[in-house]
Image (cartoon, rainbow, N blue to C red):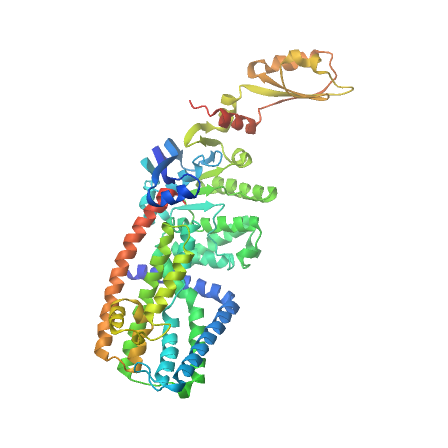
């Protein structure tokens, strides 16, 4: 069953054109030209129950706009979207009780109070019973390891602790759908990993549908089987992560370490395209079909081979390539 | 609404009031510090009027005793009806916190109403206490009147004035939907409000036309009108008429708030703050 259905969804933002300079500013007071910027254009995708889907794209690609439409903050300019059978922008209470939105850059906890107070407030907003509240809070506090900090003023928490509390408060009402907008932004590596592990575990156990945006490749590659890549308001790729690599990187990386005095560039050029070179370590980009025979050829040569490694192309490189060529098919 | 629903509804907002109470208590020192300034301002006003009255008995029908009563009772009423809502609303809109509310099963206007009730409660109590202290100091200089019907009318007027003031502040806060800078508008608006309310001096010092106009506007009911009632300078019938005007204003303001909110939200969605 599709939990999220999006069809030809478009959104344009209004803005006013203004030239720089004082004269233009004064002129703009009287006559302004209304312009439209397309944030997303005819986006289509479906997401099934329990899926964990990653939205990947550079700043301004349309990730956040999509999430904002799905959580009912924005009206689309055109097209259809349905989550759990509801039109999000109608903002029905029944729908709002079934999803949660966490934005890495916007907090919903009251900074001047302990997180616990915001939890109690949310309990009432979502109409949870005392029993439900206690049970859910205990579980979340345990898994996220935040029991000791619930009574500390939120302002005094570290960024990582804050994010954990933000997640907990958003999950109190056990949403069926969870939207995460840049949940790891600004966090250190350890905190990032903690958040990531939690999301992964939560999705696996509860079968909660999770849609996540990030521009950290790590987030996406660690968490999501399926990724949707957007750039300039359009979907460039929607599918499995491995599929992406196969599609956009028709090569693998062959990494060879040499010992003794190493090698010279001209000695190895005949084996294939050199991606990285130094005397003791060389990486080739080799066609998938030819990778085995190339490896054998190198091994059976009289070069001082110490170690040999066949690897998938670096996902960051692949993505960068997609964004820079911006190819759509 | 079912009884249980209503209970949940009330509980939701009681919790909100409770939460804001706690926040305000966290800043009790700031709240206290503000009160010192307020008290000083009133004392300065009393000294000023005492000096002006030193060579005359009556100014536009006011004796010194009446003037001091006007200042003290008026300010006591004013601290009960005021709020700082405009800043909260404009901040929520400007930095996009409003988005969080749009995704939750709670109405923003209700949320803000009860949040403000909780937020100002500490300042409210402290202000009332500090005003009472000043009144105690000048007890021999003010007029004390205990007319039950009159006090009842004043109470009703204060409650309605609280709602009116709240709606006006909310409306001013909503300007943030259209402009990036709201501080200037807010400061100007708050001065104008204080002037029209008679917060600087009794409106009766101005030409009669002016007093008549201010009776028709919502501002005077937060200071001037209830104080006039207390001083017995206007009769109960005029007071009742004033309450009717207040109720009309509340409906009018609710209508305006609703329209402006709808338009503003459309704009908010348009630019995607």
Rendering quarter of residue A252 = top right
Q: What residue is rendered at 44% in x and 69% in y?
A: B123
Residue at the image point whose x is 47% and y is 39% from the top: A212
Res A89 quadrant in image: top left
Rendered position, B119 above or below A38:
below
Task: Give the quarter of the figure containing the C terminus of chain B.
Answer: top left
Which of these two is toward me, A103 or A118? Answer: A103
Q: Is residue A4 visible?
A: no
Looking at the rendered structure, the number of numbered marks drawn on it comes to: 0
Assign the N terminus of chain B to one quadrant of the image.
Answer: bottom left
For this rendering, which residue is in front, B232 or B79? B232
Quadrant in which residue B11 is drawn:
bottom left
Q: Nearer the viewer, residue B263 or A115?
A: B263
Q: Residue B162, relative to residue A82: is it above or below?
A: below
Tell whether B226 sits left or right of A138: left
Across and down, in percent, residue B199 comes to 36, 72
B7 over A231 or under it: above or below:
below
Q: Residue furthest bottom?
A: B140
Residue B153 screen position, x and y as percent: 27, 77
Q: Could you tell me residue A309's position as x and y percent?
A: 65, 22
Frontmost residue, B269 versus B186? B186
Q: Is residue B158 visible?
A: yes
The residue under the point 48% across, 63% down is: B23
Q: Position of residue A264 (x, y in %)?
A: 73, 16
């Amino acid at each position: 069953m599709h939990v999220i259905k999006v069809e030809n969804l478009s959104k344009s933002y209004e803005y006013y054109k203004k030239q720089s300079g004082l004269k233009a500013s004064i002129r703009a007071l009287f006559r302004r030209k209304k312009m439209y910027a397309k944030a997303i254009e005819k986006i289509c995708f479906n997401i099934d129950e329990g899926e964990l889907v990653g939205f990947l794209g550079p700043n301004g690609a349309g990730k956040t706009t999509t999430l904002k439409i799905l959580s009912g903050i924005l009206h689309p300019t055109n097209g259809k979207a349905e989550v759990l059978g509801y039109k999000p922008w109608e903002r029905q209470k029944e729908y709002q009780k079934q999803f949660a939105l966490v934005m890495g850059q916007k907090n919903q906890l009251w900074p001047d109070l302990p997180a616990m107070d915001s939890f109690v407030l949310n309990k009432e907003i979502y109409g949870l019973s005392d029993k439900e509240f206690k049970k859910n809070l205990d579980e979340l506090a345990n898994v996220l390891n935040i029991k000791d900090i619930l009574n500390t003023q939120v302002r005094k928490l570290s960024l990582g602790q804050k994010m954990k509390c933000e997640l907990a408060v958003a999950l109190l009402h056990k949403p069926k759908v969870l939207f995460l907008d840049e949940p790891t932004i600004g966090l250190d590596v350890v905190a990032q990993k903690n958040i990531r592990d939690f999301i992964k575990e939560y999705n696996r156990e509860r079968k909660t549908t999770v849609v996540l945006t990030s521009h950290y490749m790590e987030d996406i590659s660690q968490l999501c089987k399926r990724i949707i890549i957007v750039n300039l308001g359009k979907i460039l790729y929607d599918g499995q992560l491995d599929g992406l690599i196969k599609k956009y990187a028709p090569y693998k990386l062959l990494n060879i370490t040499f010992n003794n005095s190493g090698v010279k560039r001209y000695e190895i050029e005949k084996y294939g395209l050199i991606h990285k070179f130094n005397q003791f370590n060389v990486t080739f980009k080799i066609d998938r079909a030819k990778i085995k025979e190339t490896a054998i050829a190198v091994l059976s040569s009289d070069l001082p081979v110490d170690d040999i490694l066949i690897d998938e192309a670096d996902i960051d490189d692949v993505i960068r390539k997609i964004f820079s060529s911006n190819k759509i098919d | 609404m079912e009884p249980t629903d209503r209970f949940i509804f009330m509980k939701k907002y009681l919790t909100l009031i409770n939460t804001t109470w706690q926040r305000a208590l966290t800043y009790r020192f700031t709240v206290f510090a503000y009160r010192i300034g307020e008290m000083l301002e009133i004392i300065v006003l009393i000294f000023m009027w005492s000096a002006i009255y030193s060579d005359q008995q009556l100014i536009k029908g006011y004796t010194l005793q009446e003037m001091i009563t006007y200042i003290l009772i008026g300010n006591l009423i004013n601290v009960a009806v005021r709020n700082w809502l405009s800043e909260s609303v404009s901040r929520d809109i400007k930095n996009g916190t409003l988005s969080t509310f749009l995704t939750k099963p709670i109405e923003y206007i209700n949320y803000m109403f009860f949040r403000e009730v909780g937020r100002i409660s500490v300042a409210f109590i402290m202000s009332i206490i500090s005003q009472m202290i000043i009144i105690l100091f000048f007890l021999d200089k003010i007029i004390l009147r205990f007319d039950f019907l009159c006090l009842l009318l004043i109470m009703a007027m204060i409650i309605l004035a609280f709602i009116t003031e709240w709606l006006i502040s909310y409306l001013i806060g909503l300007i943030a939907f259209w402009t990036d800078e709201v501080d200037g508008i807010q400061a100007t608006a708050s001065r104008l409000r204080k002037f029209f309310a008679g917060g600087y001096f009794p409106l009766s010092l101005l030409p009669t036309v002016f007093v008549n106009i201010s009776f028709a506007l919502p501002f005077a009911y937060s200071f001037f009108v209830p104080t006039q009632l207390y001083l017995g300078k206007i009769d109960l019938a005029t007071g009742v008429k004033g309450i009717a005007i207040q109720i009309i204003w509340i409906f009018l303001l609710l209508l305006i708030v609703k329209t402006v909110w709808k338009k503003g939200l459309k704009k908010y969605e348009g630019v995607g703050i």
